[in-house]
Each structure stands twice: as structure tokens, then as C-alpha cells.
């Protein structure tokens, strides 16, 4: 950006070669883009405030209807018949446990292993590093069946541990922390050692506070990752009360079937998409940073 | 690199890597090894007898018309999704770079889809586009467009591509904006002074300098379309109608869990593994180059 100050009126400043018309077109394209991007979510909200009868007689009005409280209360406290009488509350709880478990678990085990790899010297150090690194190339999708079998053998079907554990080994997070730790000057470690700080003291009093922003950034990304999982919860949960909200939603929806409770489906969909959207929007600064950096 | 200052502990580092290593070995290497082993076994449907058959499963899988079809479906789906998601995102990012006012507002709304699970994105689009109760489908019909993603394979594919790209626009948008910001404005202004119009400036300066970002996103989007879209396929079409939208990952799942063809499913897993390794290798090789442009 040129160094000129923006005019006091707050209008778009023009760079050399830019025309005012060009700026208007840019705004128009962006607004159109926003409409396309936001419409499906807005439309879900609209549908969640109408009666089932209104939804079954398309096209749906573009404005919210008057059934907001009726529909939301029914979904939250009525027990949605389609998914075996499990309320939205249980589903939200399961999904939150899974998303938090994955985010916190991943950060914890990768920060520890990155710490070991950067700040210690020990036999097999590089072997371990490569073992972790190669897992980048083994996403769940390519080893579905055998991983499922491991879950059965360990009795982890329909447990929170089963939902969380297999997804928390992450090469990306380890690589990110490793990269960051390598930028920490050796003098800092030396000073800490001279002052008599052991490795744990150094980790908790110096390294963790320094990694705060990295942890926040990673947390947002991983929370979304955990919340939006599909294949894994589909495989390891059989009981309805262990489902995540995304899987439950899939079970509720049947397009061939006339008795799908669309108004309740749409309320459930709102509950499934609003929490992660809030996390992304409220933690936008860390989110953008984490996204751009973790993929570097 | 100068030798780092390190802690002298001998046992502690092993304890620190132990949790990650344990999980990696149990849930990654062991199953991956099993997949490799099983891909060379022939098992009867009851799992009672098995025979080591070397590469028979691979030969069988690759000669199956259904598998070849699935490769085609995946390629069409990935290319279309990457093209749409990246094209739209690039257009929006270029426009967002031009404006100063409301930039933050645009970005905030643009990142919403990132938080939506792919499966839910698929269901929302199916809700809008399905022929019986979808409002958009009804409007299309009134315009005389015959549209039925439930029965028509091409329509189903279009629906999947639209839903999958919608979800990916946020991600591409953020990266394109970051890439555009790294291009020195003086370069563009100099071209403007020399009389290059907006379109010309874009194609001769901005687009070439954006190439590293574009290439990086191409790899990421391909990986996304290959693997992360299982939820969309499973929730929206279930691979149908016919086998018109059966992607490779969906087929692994379907053959393994639904049809219980263990050897075939394992062989397909191994083929996928090779694809991921190739994609990751490409990514790492070219991400190095990205550094030159910041």
C-alpha cells in the first residue's frame, strides 16, 4: 500500500491507475460474493424459523418466520425422534468434547515432542522426528479398515477416547512448534540453566508463555478440525447418544422420506454450524495467522 | 547451524516424545502396515481363511471398470472443485485488495464457510437444490431448467462440486489475499504509469507473481477434494445415482465397510497412500520455492 494517508472522509483511496468506477465494481463483486457465500447459512436460519408445512411448500420465503421459539425449544428439549430420542444438548456436548479433546490433546502431545526434539540431544532423535513427519502422508482415509480394527481390539468403540485419540497425532502441529522453537535464541536456554532452572521450569515459565500466540492460532484451526470431522465419528460411534451433531444430522435427513422433520433438522443444523463460526469469527486474528502459518 | 544449547537430561526426552510416538505407532503405523499386508491377502467373506496372493488384489482392482470409473469421477470432481473454488476466491481476493473501506467486514463474512463441516455444507446445498422441496430447484424449474441431482448423474456431480467449492472458498480467499499483499505495490504502480491497463497489469504482473500461492493452493485443493470431501459424498449422494459420484475414498469405505471386500479395500487404501505421498512430496518441493516471494 502507498504511504499516503486515507482521506478523512474514509472513502477508498485510489492508487495510481485505479478508477473510481473500478472501486465500485470491486464493491459490487464483493457484495455479490458475500451473498453467495453467506446465503446457505442465512437460508438455514430462515428455514429453522418456519413450520414444517411451509418448508414442504417451496419456495421458502426469504425472511424468517414466527416459529423461532417453538422450533428451537422442541429441538432442544423435545428429543428429536429421528435420532433415537437424543436431544441436541447431548449431541452438542459430544461434539464439544471431541473438538476440545482433539485441539487440546494435539497441542499437548506435539508441543512436548517438539520440545524434546529441539532442546535435547538423544539417540534416535531424528528417527523419532521422521516417524512423526511421515504421518503427514497417512490420513485416516487411507487406513480406514485396519484403524477401525485397532479400535475394536482396544474396546474404544462408542467412547470419547475412541473419538479423540486416533486423531490427535499430528505432524503439522509438531512441525509448527519445532519451527518456532528453533527461533528461540540459545542464550535464553543458557541463561535459564545458569539461573538453575531445570527443563520443566524452562518449559512452563519461558517456553509456554512465548508460545501463547502459536497455541491460540493452532487451537482455532484444530477446534474446527475436530468439530467438522465426519468419517471417523461415523465409524467409531454406533450408539445414538455418542453421535456427534454432524453425524446425527446425517441420520435425521432423508430426502426420499416424506416424514423428515425439516424444521427440526434446520434447527440442529444451526446448532452444528454456529459454534464453530463463532470461534472463527471471534478469534479471527489468531485463526488467519494460524492458517497461513501452519500450512507454510 | 551452530550447535544449540540443550538440556543434558538422558531419560526425559524419551518421556516427552512417548505420548505422540505411542499414538503414532498404534493408530498410524500399525494400521498402515496392516493395510499393506492385507492388500496382498485374499480372504473369504467370513474371514476364516486367507491366502497370500502378492499383487493380485491390485491387478484386480485396477482392472475393475468400477474402479476406473471411480478414478475418472475423482479426477473430474477434483479438477472442477479446485478450479471453481480457486477461481472464485481469486476474483474476490483481487477485488478485496482494491478496496479499503469495509475490508474487514468482507473478510469476516468470507471466512464463515470454513467453519462449516463439509457434510453439512453438502446437506444445506441438497436442501436448497433437491427437486421435491428445494426452493432453488423449484425456481430453476420455473425458469424451465430441468434439474434433478437425485436421478441425474451430471446434476449430482454439479451439486457436489458447488457444495465442495463453496466450503473451500474461505481458505483460498485468505491465502490469495496474503499472496496479493506480498506483491510490491510500487511494481503495479510503475506499470500503471507506463500505461498498462488494469487487465494487463493483472495478467502480466499480479498473476505471475501469485504463481507460488496458486500452485500451493492447487495442491491443497486437490488433497481436499480427494480426501476431505468424503462427508459431502456420503451425506449427499452416497456415490449415486448409479456410480456417478463414487470417489476413490468413498469406494474404499464402501467396499470395506459395506461390501466387506477386505483385500480389495486394502489394495485401494494402498493406492490412495501412494497418491497422498506424491501430493505431499510435490507440496514440500514447491513450498520451498514459495519462500522467494515471501
Image (tube, coloured by chain):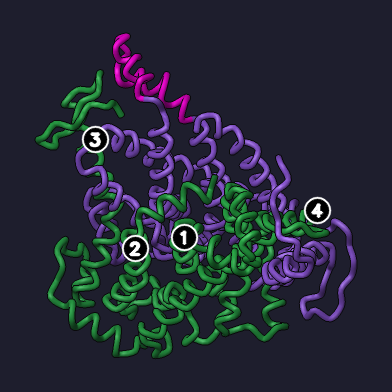
Chain colours: A green, B purple
Dot 3: element: loop
Q: Nearer the viewer, residue A193 or B265?
A: A193
Proximity of marks 3 and 1: CB atoms separated by less than 8 Å = no
Q: Nearer the viewer, residue A128 or B226?
A: A128
Residue at the disc numbered 3: B99
Residue at the disc numbered 2: A277
- Tell whether B259 sits left or right of A11: right
Q: Report if residue A201 lies within the magenta region.
A: no
x, y percentage for residue A65?
A: 14, 71
Residue at the disc numbered 4: B59
Q: 10 Å neighbourhood of mark 1: few (<14), some, or many (≥20)?
A: few
Chief secondary structure of the magenta portion: helix
Q: Are marks 4 and 1 on the same chain?
A: no
Q: 10 Å neighbourhood of mark 4: few (<14), some, or many (≥20)?
A: few
- Tell whether B41 sits left or right of B108: right
Q: Are marks 3 and 1 on the same chain?
A: no
Specify the quadrant of the image occupied by residue B3: top right
Residue furthest out toward the front: A195
- Magenta segment: B185-210
Proximity of marks 3 and 4: CB atoms separated by less than 8 Å = no
Q: Report if residue B191 lies within the magenta region.
A: yes
Residue at the disc numbered 1: A212
Dot 2: element: helix
- Tell whether B178 sits left or right of A115: left
Amino acid at each position: 500500500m502507498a504511504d499516503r494517508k486515507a482521506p478523512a472522509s474514509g472513502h477508498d483511496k485510489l492508487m495510481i491507475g485505479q478508477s473510481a468506477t473500478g472501486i465500485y465494481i470491486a464493491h459490487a463483486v464483493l457484495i455479490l460474493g458475500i451473498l453467495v457465500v453467506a446465503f446457505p447459512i442465512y437460508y438455514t436460519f430462515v428455514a429453522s424459523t418456519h413450520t414444517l408445512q411451509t418448508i414442504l411448500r417451496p419456495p421458502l420465503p426469504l425472511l424468517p418466520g414466527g416459529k423461532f421459539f417453538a422450533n428451537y425449544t422442541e429441538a432442544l428439549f423435545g428429543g428429536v425422534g429421528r435420532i433415537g430420542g437424543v436431544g441436541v444438548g447431548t449431541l452438542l456436548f459430544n461434539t464439544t468434547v471431541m473438538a476440545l479433546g482433539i485441539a487440546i490433546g494435539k497441542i499437548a502431545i506435539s508441543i512436548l515432542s517438539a520440545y524434546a526434539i529441539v532442546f535435547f540431544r538423544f539417540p534416535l532423535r531424528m528417527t523419532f522426528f521422521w516417524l512423526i513427519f511421515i504421518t503427514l502422508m497417512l490420513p485416516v482415509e487411507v487406513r480406514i479398515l485396519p484403524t477401525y480394527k485397532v479400535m475394536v481390539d482396544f474396546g474404544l468403540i462408542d467412547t470419547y477416547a475412541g473419538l479423540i485419540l486416533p486423531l490427535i497425532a499430528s505432524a503439522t502441529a509438531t512441525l509448527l512448534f519445532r519451527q518456532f522453537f528453533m527461533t528461540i535464541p540459545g542464550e535464553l536456554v543458557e541463561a535459564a540453566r545458569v539461573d538453575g532452572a531445570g527443563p520443566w521450569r524452562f518449559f512452563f515459565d519461558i517456553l509456554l508463555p512465548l508460545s501463547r500466540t502459536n497455541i491460540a492460532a493452532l487451537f482455532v484451526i484444530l477446534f474446527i478440525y475436530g468439530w467438522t470431522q465426519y468419517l471417523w465419528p461415523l465409524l467409531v460411534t454406533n450408539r445414538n447418544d455418542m453421535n456427534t451433531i454432524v453425524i446425527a444430522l446425517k441420520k435425521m435427513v432423508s430426502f426420499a422420506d416424506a416424514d423428515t422433520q425439516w424444521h427440526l433438522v434446520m434447527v440442529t443444523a444451526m446448532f452444528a454450524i454456529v459454534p464453530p463460526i463463532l470461534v472463527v469469527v471471534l478469534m479471527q486474528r489468531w485463526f488467519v495467522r494460524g492458517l497461513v502459518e501452519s500450512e507454510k | 547451524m551452530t550447535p544449540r544449547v540443550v538440556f543434558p537430561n538422558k531419560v526425559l526426552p524419551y518421556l516427552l516424545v512417548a505420548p505422540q510416538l505411542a499414538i503414532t505407532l498404534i493408530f498410524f503405523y500399525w494400521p498402515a502396515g496392516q493395510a499393506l499386508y492385507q492388500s496382498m491377502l485374499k480372504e473369504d467373506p467370513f474371514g476364516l481363511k486367507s491366502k497370500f496372493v502378492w499383487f493380485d488384489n491390485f491387478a484386480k482392482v485396477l482392472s475393475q471398470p468400477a474402479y476406473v470409473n471411480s478414478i475418472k469421477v475423482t479426477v473430474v470432481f477434483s479438477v472442477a472443485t479446485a478450479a471453481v473454488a480457486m477461481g472464485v476466491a481469486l476474483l474476490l481476493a483481487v477485488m478485496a485488495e482494491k478496496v479499503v473501506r469495509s475490508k474487514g467486514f468482507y473478510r469476516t463474512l468470507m471466512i464463515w464457510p470454513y467453519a462449516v463441516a463439509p457434510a453439512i455444507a453438502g446437506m444445506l446445498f441438497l436442501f436448497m437444490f433437491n427437486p421435491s422441496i428445494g426452493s432453488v430447484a423449484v425456481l430453476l424449474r420455473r425458469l424451465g431448467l430441468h434439474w434433478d441431482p437425485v436421478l441425474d448423474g451430471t446434476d449430482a456431480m454439479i451439486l457436489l462440486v458447488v457444495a465442495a467449492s463453496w466450503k473451500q472458498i474461505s481458505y483460498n480467499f485468505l491465502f490469495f489475499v496474503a499472496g496479493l499483499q506480498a506483491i510490491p505495490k510500487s511494481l503495479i504502480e510503475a506499470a500503471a504509469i507506463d500505461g498498462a491497463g488494469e487487465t494487463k497489469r493483472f495478467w502480466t504482473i499480479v498473476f505471475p507473481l501469485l504463481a507460488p500461492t496458486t500452485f500451493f493452493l492447487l495442491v491443497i485443493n486437490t488433497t481436499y477434494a480427494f480426501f476431505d470431501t468424503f462427508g459431502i459424498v456420503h451425506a449427499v449422494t452416497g456415490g449415486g445415482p448409479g456410480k456417478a459420484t463414487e470417489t476413490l475414498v468413498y469406494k474404499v469405505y464402501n467396499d470395506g465397510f459395506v461390501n466387506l471386500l477386505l483385500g480389495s479395500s486394502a489394495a485401494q487404501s494402498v493406492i490412495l497412500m501412494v497418491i497422498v505421498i506424491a501430493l505431499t512430496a510435490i507440496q514440500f518441493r514447491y513450498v520451498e520455492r514459495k519462500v522467494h516471494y515471501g
